[in-house]
């Protein structure tokens, strides 16, 4: 039972434009959400997180939006750069249980 | 501050053997979690250790075990290896203070690529 879903396996964006990666979850107990960037054969690199008490969090070019009623979050990257090309995973956890539930990932390709 | 380190980076074993993987967390982090990544199942949680105690466990057979030492370093052991255990094994550490949620952010190591022949 996949509790965190990323329905788009891949996304291609022109350099300088906005990249929007989406993630849906089913467990209403999740209260902390994270985005990671991953290259093959490497560990995920933490990008940005958001607690369920917020609906938006920004860090430089990265912004995460959380819509609790829709159980949906998205990562916006503006402007997109070729170095952003990687697989992006969203993950979720609930208070009291430190295990992360991961989506299946979205491969982002930023075209120069 | 040094990141999470894992050793070895690559390992080749044969079916039936056992293997031990090691993880050193970020200094000051008390929680260590282990994950398995495979093409078919994605990233799946194995277990979490905090203050030398297993605090949380995923849905894996008893062949997968771990421990944590007083310096927060952790080891993961897989006994009686099967072909399906071939995967990238990832360790993550977090501060986990019981306070703000940002303290639960997990930082990952580079992983150990295990191949079972």
Image (spheres, coloured by chain):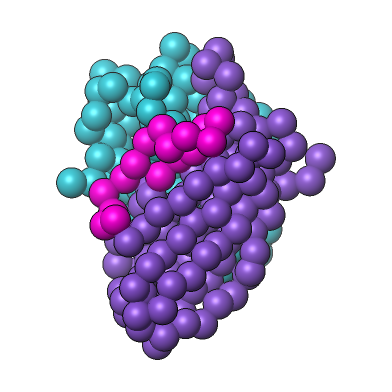
Q: Which residues are magenta?
A: B47-62
Pick the residue in front: A50 or B54.
B54
- Whether residue B63 sits left or right of residue A47 in the image: it is left
Residue B61 in magenta stretch: yes
Residue B60 highlighted magenta (yes or no): yes
Relative to B95, A52 lies left or right:
left
Q: Is residue B8 visible?
A: yes
* Residue at 29% in and 56% down: B62
Residue at left offset 74%, top offset 37%: B27
Query: In the image, residue B73 lies at what x, y percent?
Result: 64, 46
Q: Residue at x 30, y 37 (%)?
A: A24
**Which picture quadrant has residue A82?**
bottom right
Task: Out of B96 and A57, give the one closest to the viewer.
Answer: B96
Q: Is residue A61 left or right of residue A5?
A: right
The outermost residue toward the left is A1
**B46 relative to A70 in the view: left or right:** right
Relative image position of residue B112 (x, y in whole percent)? 56, 66
Q: x and y percent of residue B108 in the render?
A: 59, 48
B17 in relation to A98, above or below: below
Tell me what residue is drawn at x 47 percent, y 20 percent: A51
Q: Chain A's shade in the image?
A: cyan
- Chain B in the picture: what colour? purple
Q: Nearer the viewer, residue B94 or A42?
A: B94
């Amino acid at each position: 039972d996949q509790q965190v879903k990323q329905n788009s396996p891949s996304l291609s964006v022109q350099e300088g434009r906005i990249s929007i990666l989406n993630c849906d979850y089913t467990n209403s107990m999740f209260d902390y959400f994270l985005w990671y960037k991953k290259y093959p054969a490497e560990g995920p690199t933490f990008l940005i997180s958001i607690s369920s008490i917020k609906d938006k969090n920004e860090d430089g070019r990265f912004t995460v939006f959380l819509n609790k009623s829709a159980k949906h979050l998205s990562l916006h990257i503006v402007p997109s750069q070729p170095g952003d090309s990687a697989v992006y995973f969203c993950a979720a956890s609930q208070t009291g249980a430190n295990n992360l539930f991961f989506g299946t990932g979205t491969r982002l390709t930023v075209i120069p | 501050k040094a990141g999470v380190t894992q050793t070895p980076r690559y390992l080749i074993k044969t079916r039936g053997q056992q293997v031990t993987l090691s993880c050193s967390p970020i200094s000051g982090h008390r929680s260590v979690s282990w994950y398995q990544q495979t093409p078919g199942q994605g990233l799946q949680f194995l277990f979490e250790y905090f203050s030398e105690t297993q605090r949380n466990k995923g849905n894996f057979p008893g062949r997968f075990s771990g421990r944590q030492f007083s310096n927060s370093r952790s080891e993961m052991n897989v006994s009686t290896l099967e072909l399906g255990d071939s995967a990238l094994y990832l360790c993550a550490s977090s501060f986990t203070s019981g306070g703000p949620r940002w303290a639960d952010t997990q930082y990952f190591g580079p992983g150990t690529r295990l191949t079972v022949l």
